[in-house]
Amino acid sequence: MGNEAIKLELMEWLSKLEDGNTIEYLRIVKDATSSDGEWWNDLTAEQKAGIDRGLRDIDAGRTTADEVVKKKYGL
């Protein structure tokens, strides 16, 4: 199926969609792909602070291997 056919199928589906959560999710996806391409600019100050804390933890060696976490939580 080519892109044009897929777009038509999606437009038809979207025109009948009534689920508000799905519509809001699709709006977020649309807005994310039409921004300036710099995802950092779209983050809140709280999100940026969380990322900065995580990076400082990595630099300070405050990390746990994923194998340890998986074992601890039975994953």
Image: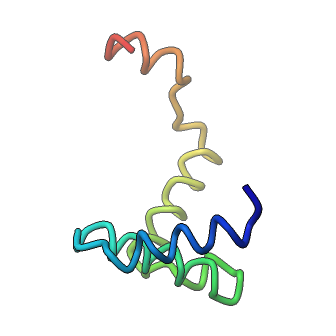
Vertical relation: 18 (above or below) 63: below
Q: How many marks?
A: 0
Name the spot of residue 5 as percent of width and height, x first.
67, 67
Q: Give the quadrant of the N terminus.
A: bottom right
Q: Please identify the residue farthest to the right as the structure is shown.
A: 2
Q: Give the quadrant of the C terminus.
A: top left
Vertical relation: 58 (above or below) 27: above
Q: How is the image coloured?
A: rainbow
Name the spot of residue 56 as percent of width and height, x first.
57, 55
Instruction: Return the residue nearer the eye: 72 or 53.
Output: 72
Instruction: Return the residue nearer the eye: 34 or 4.
Output: 4
Vertical relation: 2 (above or below) 20: above
Residue at 60%, 45% in the rendered image = 58
Residue at 69%, 89% in the rendered image = 36
Name the spot of residue 57 as percent of width and height, x first.
54, 48
Q: Quadrant of residue 2?
A: bottom right
Q: Would residue 68 be found to the left or right of residue 17 on screen?
A: right
